[in-house]
Image (cartoon, coloured by chain):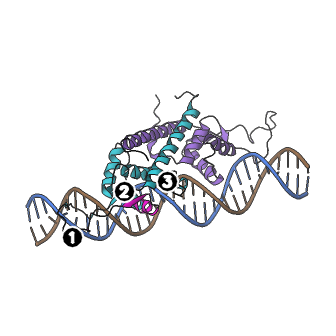
Chain colours: A cyan, B purple, C blue, D brown
Amino acid sequence: MPHQEDDISHLLPLREPTFFILLSLSEGEKHGYAIIKDVAALSNGKVNLSTGTLYEALARLLDQLLIERVEGRGDAGGDAPELEAHPGRPRKAYRLTPKGGQVVQAEMARLQSLILAAKRRLAGQAGS
Amino acid sequence: MPHQEDDISHLLPLREPTFFILLSLSEGEKHGYAIIKDVAALSNGKVNLSTGTLYEALARLLDQLLIERVEGRGDAGGDAPELEAHPGRPRKAYRLTPKGGQVVQAEMARLQSLILAAKRRLAGQAGS
DNA sequence: CAAATTAAGTCGGTATCCGACATATAGTGA
DNA sequence: TCACTATATGTCGGATACCGACTTAATTTG
């Protein structure tokens, strides 16, 4: 098992928007606007990222090496025919790095032990 | 069921320290310093509240009516004999209000649906 | 009385979120 | 052709909560 010589624990806990962004990218690469829509669907409409939150988070996650830009599409090829046009500014796609995947897993574990501790503590007093 | 004419959802999500404080008080009334020690135990030593975090959170939670002061002990009685002495400043005990209990429950529910969504999303790609 | 322990409180710095605003590109219809 | 709409990225200022460092207070013990 390749230990990556970096301590991940100081990145936790993740705030809700950040966790959803990483979770969205764990499915596959996406560009920013697609993440916003995916997160809304993923959370049953409960989490609606503002563009401020999204693009600032993406910059931060790039900096922390939890995600990376996907090159190739955008403005690379000369006259590639498979370049499908689309409205809006040129898209920038991102993908999860291995380290990003580790962080998602670690946050999942934290969440689960949190719920476990809460259930233990809450067991014993009647609710309502 | 007594609906309390207040929308709780704008108080969520709770940050980790705040959730642990409310969880600690859901067991019974405690004073600040005791909460710090209880939360550390409750989280297997992972969450160690700084006093800044704790006392600022208590003030905020009082303001939001999620907790309340427990009167009676401290400096109320004239010369009550059951007043056990203890070192340190006069203790101030807090307890969870019904609204505070609702918030804990709502946060639990949020956490569980979060984990559910994450498991759904993560199921399908190999881990490691 | 000094030191240690328990306890509460304050403050400045920092991280993240959020809404509002700005910018850029492409398709559509009058 | 020119506005309008939808898609898409990016910036900025304000607000909130956390955190470590520091301060104050009260009691016990040597």
Judged from the image, the secondary structure of the residue bearing numbered disc 2 is strand
Q: Which-is-in-front pick, marks 1 and 2? A: 1
Spot occupied by residue A61 in the image (x, y as percentages of width and height): 43, 59
Residue closest to the eye, B82 or D18 = D18
> Three-letter amino acid code at disc 1?
Gly
Label 2: which residue?
A95
Label 3: which residue?
A2
Judged from the image, the secondary structure of the residue bearing numbered disc 1 is loop
Mark 1 / mark 2, whichever is N-terminal: 1
Residue drawn at 41 percent across, 39 percent down: B116
Judged from the image, the secondary structure of the residue bearing numbered disc 3 is loop
Label 1: which residue?
A78
> Three-letter amino acid code at disc 3?
Pro
Residue B63 visible (yes or no): no
Specify whether residue B101 is painted magenta. no
Q: Which-is-in-front pick, marks 3 and 2? A: 3
Mark 3 / mark 2, whichever is N-terminal: 3
Q: Which-is-in-front pick, marks 3 and 1? A: 3
